[in-house]
Structure formats: structure tokens, C-alpha cells
Image (tube, rainbow, N blue to C red):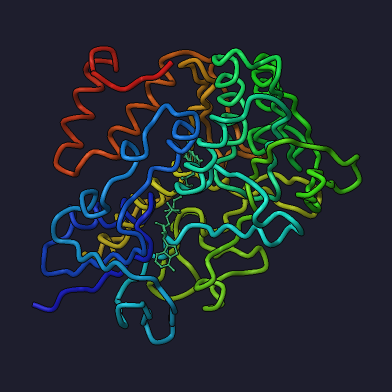
Amino acid sequence: MNGTRILILGGGVGGLTVVNELRQQLPRYHRITLVEQNENHAFAPSFLWLMTGDRRPEQITVPLRRLVREGVDVVQAEVTSIDVARQGVGTTQGDLSYDYLVIALGAELAPEQIPGLAGSFYSFYTFEETKKLRDALGKFRQGKIALVVSTLPYKCPGAPHEAAMLLATFFRKRGLHDRVTVHLYTPEAHPMPVAGPQLGEAVNQMLASKGVAFHPLHKLTSVDSQARTLSFDGKESASYDMLIAIPPHRSPRVAREATLTNESGWIPVDRSTLKTRHENVYAIGDIVAISLPGRWKPDVPMMLPKAGVFAHEHGRIVARRIVDEMNGVVSKAEFCGPGYCMLEAGEGLAGFAFGDFFAEPTPRVELRNIGRAWHIGKVLFEQWWLSPFGLKKSLLKTALMSGGKVMKIPVKI
Ligand SMILES: Cc1cc2nc3c(=O)[nH]c(=O)nc-3n(C[C@H](O)[C@H](O)[C@H](O)COP(=O)(O)OP(=O)(O)OC[C@H]3O[C@@H](n4cnc5c(N)ncnc54)[C@H](O)[C@@H]3O)c2cc1C
């Protein structure tokens, strides 16, 4: 029997979800191939705990193979070209063709887009960079830390605020809170703007309670690493002793070269089905552009944030749709815009934001009071995500039954 060839590019949150869901739902004679450049998978939300020394590197990485169901072909290679007209993909391990293609290549970091930034900052946005930052923080005993969101969009709208609060806690625990100040600069008008001003104000208060100085509407234009000075569009420049930056994001080169992206720089998709404009080609996760109801400014639509929670849900929807289509069924699986986030506040506490990002006239997102349960929820999710495939279900079940209370989880306070 001739099977269908399904090719998934990128073995991050979205890609892993698609391959595992497909493998579970499809008979073995259909071929599922995953192309991923990295041998190991690192869980990005835990980079914040790696930064503060609450995780060791080996606790948040796992060989990719262990997260993939049996019966998926894993090709460790870089994707070098995508040709949707020929239904082919070039990789450093040879060419592949497909009947269905799912593009889940995430976002690429591009510090060179801001003059002076490249080579002059620490970051918690990659595994390797976070280890360097952790080492530098261990030696930092006095001065001003500038944590800068350089451009929009960036992955995980909560991450800079979580990082700022964790840094403030980190120095307080070391008795250095009188000597080290944490400043957060961002081009946004308030924290997590897609969630609305009320939620932004609540996060503002969380930052203030930790002593973090928040500087909204600061669009970084250049960095002078000799003088340790940041310049902003229309604002006074600021000095720093340590610069931690979230560098500019863009779609990976291979997607841009294949002219799959639009003027936003990301791949446009149908917001419900995740289909691109090309036959049998889907795109999911950070690489997509999905506009939301509501506008930043009259001429700028709001976009769905780049977050693992969406990549995960996209992956589930796309797998279901492909299976339905292969079975000749009209698929009812649609992405409806649900999202949530546990916002780490330090000291073993977190807030919980959740809502409907497709709500009219603007996304409707609520923030629950900070508490220990949300932090434990985040830890449980981390443990579940990183556990080998066979263990996942039983681990999750135990966790849910125990309410997170009796499990021996490395919860750090
Ligand atoms: C510090 C930090 C904290 C975060 N916290 C949260 C959180 O609490 N909650 C949340 O929802 N989200 C969080 N995120 C965001 C989340 O990690 C991403 O949104 C999510 O990983 C996106 O999934 P994806 O599949 O689209 O991309 P990714 O998970 O980035 O996967 C893309 C994959 O494609 C591979 N790839 C790229 N180019 C190529 C190529 N040419 N050839 C082969 N392989 C390639 C990459 O190696 C990568 O493995 C956080 C991110 C960071 C950095």
C-alpha cells in the first residue's frame, strides 16, 4: 500500500506536537519525517531558571529522539531550501519530498539589526547564551542591570517581566538588593499589551513590588558598549553596567528565501486552519503571522503573540486536520485563540494569565492573583514536557491526581 509522506520542518514545541499526534493517529505505512538541526531539545521556559541557577543545564535538555514517538523518521539536518512548487525540501542530508508539509521552524534572532548590539549583550533567549549569563550574574555584585526588549515581536510576552522579577529576587537572596538595580526597557506602552491595559497595570504592580524600574515606550536605536550607553528613539539615553537584551526576532532565512513570508516578515496562514496559501502546506508556531481583533494604532493590527502554548495548540490542530483530510472527512478541528501563561514572580510564586485571543472587539485576557499553585503548575508542565515519551502520560496523571503536592519535583524557592 502506498503511504502518504508527511514532512515536518523544525523539532521544537510545534513540530514535536505534530509528529507525535500524527504518529498516534495514523497507520504505520504513512511516512512521518521530522527534520531538526539540533540533536538535543532545550526547554525554553526553563532558561529563566537556568539563568538564576535554579536548574542545571542537564535538567532542561534532552536528546530529541526521546521526545519523539517510535515510527517517526528523524533527520538531523539543516533545512536549506523549500520549494512548494516542486513539493520538495533541501537539507544538508539530502533532498526530501512530501505530500503534506508542516513548517515549524520558529524564529531566528538577529542582534545585528540594532547598531552596536551584536556581541555586547547577555541573553536568556538561547540555551548557550543563558549559561554565559548565569556565570556573569554569579560575579555581578554592584551596579545597574538594563534588561532591554529591543524590538517587537518577540517570543513569550511574559518572559522579560518574569526575568526582571527573578533577577530582583536573585540579588535580594544574596543580600545585594541595595547595590544592584534592575531596569526593564521596552518599546511597549505597558507589559503584555495584547492582554490589555488592566492586565498591564497588574504586571506593573508586580514589577514595582520587586523593586524593578519599568521604562515603557523605549525603542532601542543603538548600543555603545564602550561607554555602556543605550540610545532610544525620542528618549534620553541610559547607562548600564550589565546589558541583558532580547534581540530582534525574524523568520528563519530559509522561509524568507522561499518567499513564504509576507510584508510582516512572517508566514501568513488562515487563523483557524493554519493553512498557508500553498496546497497541502501548513505553518505553525512562532513562524506565523496571525492578526487579532483590535489595533495597536489605527494602521497596525495586533498579532497573536509568539508562545509555546500557541505552537502546541497549532500542532494539535494541524495533525487532526491532516488526518481528517487523509480520511476524506471534513475537519472540524480549528484554532480558536485560547492561550494561557504562568508568569514567574520569584520566591516560588507565579501569576496565571489566560484568555481568548480571538475575542471581539479585542482579546480578553485575565490575570489570577499570584500564588504557589501556578508556579507548581509551571514546574509540572516542564517535567511532563521533558519526560521520555512512554513516561509522559503516567507522570501527568500522577501529577494531576496529587495536585502537585506529593510529587518529588525540584521546586526551588
Ligand atoms: C526564555 C523564554 C521563555 C519562554 N517561556 C514561555 C512560556 O512560559 N510559555 C510559552 O508558551 N512560551 C514560552 N516561550 C516561547 C516558546 O519557547 C516558543 O514560542 C515556542 O518554542 C515556539 O515553538 P515553535 O515550534 O514555533 O518554535 P521552536 O520551539 O523554536 O522550534 C523551532 C525549531 O526549528 C529548528 N530550526 C530552525 N531553523 C532550522 C533549519 N533551517 N533547519 C533545521 N531546523 C531548524 C530549531 O532548531 C528549533 O528546534 C519562551 C521562550 C523563551 C526564549
Residue depicted at 20% across the width and 26% down the height: 397
* 3 lies above or below 335: below
Residue 343 is situated, as x and y percent measured from the top left of the image, at 52, 27
Q: Quadrant of the C terminus?
A: top left
Residue 153 is situated, as x and y percent measured from the top left of the image, at 64, 50
Q: Nearer the viewer, residue 386 or 129?
A: 129
Residue 41 is situated, as x and y percent measured from the top left of the image, at 33, 50
Q: Nearer the viewer, residue 314 or 191?
A: 191
* Residue lying furthest left: 1
Residue depicted at 73% across the width and 39% down the height: 186
Residue depicted at 53% across the width and 46% down the height: 125
Residue 307 is situated, as x and y percent measured from the top left of the image, at 50, 44
Q: Give the side of residue 286 with respect to residue 12, left or right.
A: right
* 265 lies above or below 210: below
* 65 lies above or below 261: above
Q: Quadrant of the N terminus?
A: bottom left
Q: Give the side of residue 67 with respect to residue 27, left or right.
A: right
Q: Give the side of residue 276 with respect to residue 396, left or right.
A: right
Q: Quadrant of residue 241?
A: top right
